Amino acid sequence: MSKLRPTTQVQEMSVQSALELTTTLGELPVWEIHLDVICPGKSLTAAFEQEPLLPGIILTQNHHYRGMISRRRFFERMSRPYSQEIFTRRPIEILYAFLEVEHLILPEDTSIIQATRIALQRSPELVYEPIVIQSKTVHTSAESTLFETYKLLDFHQLLLDYSQIPDLALHHLQKTEQGARVAEANLRKLQNNYTRYLQTEKMASLGQLVAGVAHEINNPMNFIHGNLRHLEKYNQKLLKLIQLYQHNYPEPTGEIKTEIESIDLPFLQADMPKMIESMKVGTDRIRQIVLSLRNFSRADEAELKVVDIHEGIDSTLMILEHRLKAHSNYPAIKIIKDYGDLPLVECYPGQLNQVFMNILVNAIDALEDVNERRRSEGLEHHLGQVIIRTSFQDSGQNSGWVQIAIADNGSGIPESIQSRIFDPFFTTKPVGKGTGMGMSISHQIISERHSGRLNFYSTPEAGTEFVIQLPIDLGLN
Ligand SMILES: Nc1ncnc2c1ncn2[C@@H]1O[C@H](COP(=O)(O)OP(=O)(O)OP(=O)(O)O)[C@@H](O)[C@H]1O
Ligand SMILES: [Mg+2]
């Protein structure tokens, strides 16, 4: 059985909490003034006069909900002839019987959006009537009773709150959008860090592999190179001995004569020293490559070192030699070195090599790009070149800085994308070819790790120049 929860006769209007899209009627400021129908009509007048904003009064009978009388209906009735005389002293019940008004009763968990829609559908003469809000509370204490509470909501208050809905919806949308942006930014940051990590890892393992291969080649190479000197000496001695024989025995036997002819002794005598000489050139070249590989990998040099920048550039070029050579579709790329007099530079050599590598690979890609396009248009090859200029500033603004400029005459960078070149993941290359991290990482290495600067100048269809500026002394010691 449901019972009206006993309330004091007059209660304050409840305070409203911050409005939200999901706010329900139970959270709005409501009126809770109850009068029993046996009270005389004048108690209604007193209550309405005491609370000038009171929209209506809940009527009860033996603590049960009986109905509601609104301010408007009450005063309208009381203004009629004889009403004062008839109703003031008699119980409210009698007045209420005359009013016969239907009420809108809504559960307290109705949202303000729903409630406004329902309330507006009322007939025109009732549309401004207050709304009765019903809430149910179970009290388990003594006899597990269901209490019903009835409160009144001023229709004007509902409209006022409803009018804030568009603003709330907009705010909600903005918050959702903002949240999505933050999530996207976090995701990008995560991706960025991950790719940076992968790149660094890739370079580190490439460095280790290169260092390993270089080491493996180095041992047998030294062995060959060391023995070649002896081979050369023994060969000289043997040739001298043959000469001596030929001198002392100018007329050899028939068998020896035939053998001399069959092996073409004069040719062997002339060719043997040349062959050994070319082998020496070959082993020297291999030794140089091994040195470059070791230099490039700098596996043992993750630490700050004082190095010759030219060595780093040269060994990087050596690693990229296969891409500089002529291919079936492209002519060779010419490397022009214009090296200045550079002092040793304090830096992380492995990382600087990574920057040279990223810039040079981009230059080669841009040159191949030009030739690819020309080929598809049936045009002649374009002769690609990369000019590497280095210089040292010993006076003026950048005194104590070295500059390395790497310029290609490739496809150039369209102006519209120039501002994005250092953005992580920005690439114009086909999927799978570029990650778009090369320049972003290079920029970080130069500016953050070396307190230097990395800029570029590009003319579309003419070429691009990347300029690295580094202080020779990082001032860490
Ligand atoms: N020398 C250059 N000539 C023309 N465009 C260039 C040159 N250097 C860089 N770019 C442009 O800048 C973009 C970004 O270069 P970045 O090196 O960061 O990424 P990527 O080369 O595309 O990919 P990867 O991560 O494999 O290096 C390139 O996709 C290219 O459009
Ligand atoms: Mg690149």
Image (cartoon, rainbow, N blue to C red):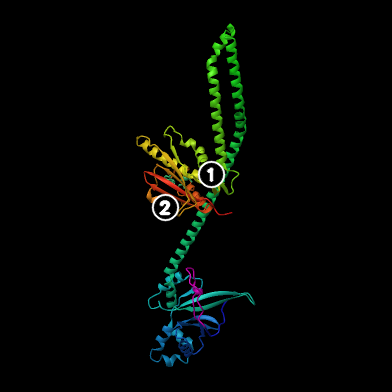
Question: Nearest the camera: 224 or 6?
Answer: 224
x then y, percent, for residue 216: 61, 35
Q: Check residue 27 for magenta coloring.
A: yes
Q: Is residue 433 visible?
A: no
Distance from disc 1 to disc 2, alpha carbons, whole Å, reads: 32 Å
Q: Looking at the image, is mark 1 or mark 2 earlier in the sequence?
A: 1
Image quarter in which the N terminus is found? bottom right
Label 1 belongs to which residue? 308
Dot 1: within a 10 Å radius of its alpha carbon, few (fewer than 14), some, or many (20 or more) residues?
some
Residue range highlighted in magenta: 12-31
Label 2 belongs to which residue? 419
Main SS of the magenta part reads: loop
Question: Nearest the camera: 258 or 212?
Answer: 258
- Count of numbered badges drawn on the protein: 2
Image quarter in which the C terminus is found? bottom right
x then y, percent, for residue 253: 59, 7
Q: Check residue 155 for magenta coloring.
A: no
x then y, percent, for residue 25: 49, 73
Q: Is residue 164 above or below residue 272?
A: below
Question: Tag 1, which secondary structure?
Answer: loop
Dot 1 and dot 2 residues touching (CB under 8 Å): no
Question: Tag 2, which secondary structure?
Answer: helix
Locate residue 446 relative to residue 139 in the image: left or right: left
Point out the residue furthest to the top here.
Answer: 254
Point out the residue furthest to the right here.
Answer: 142
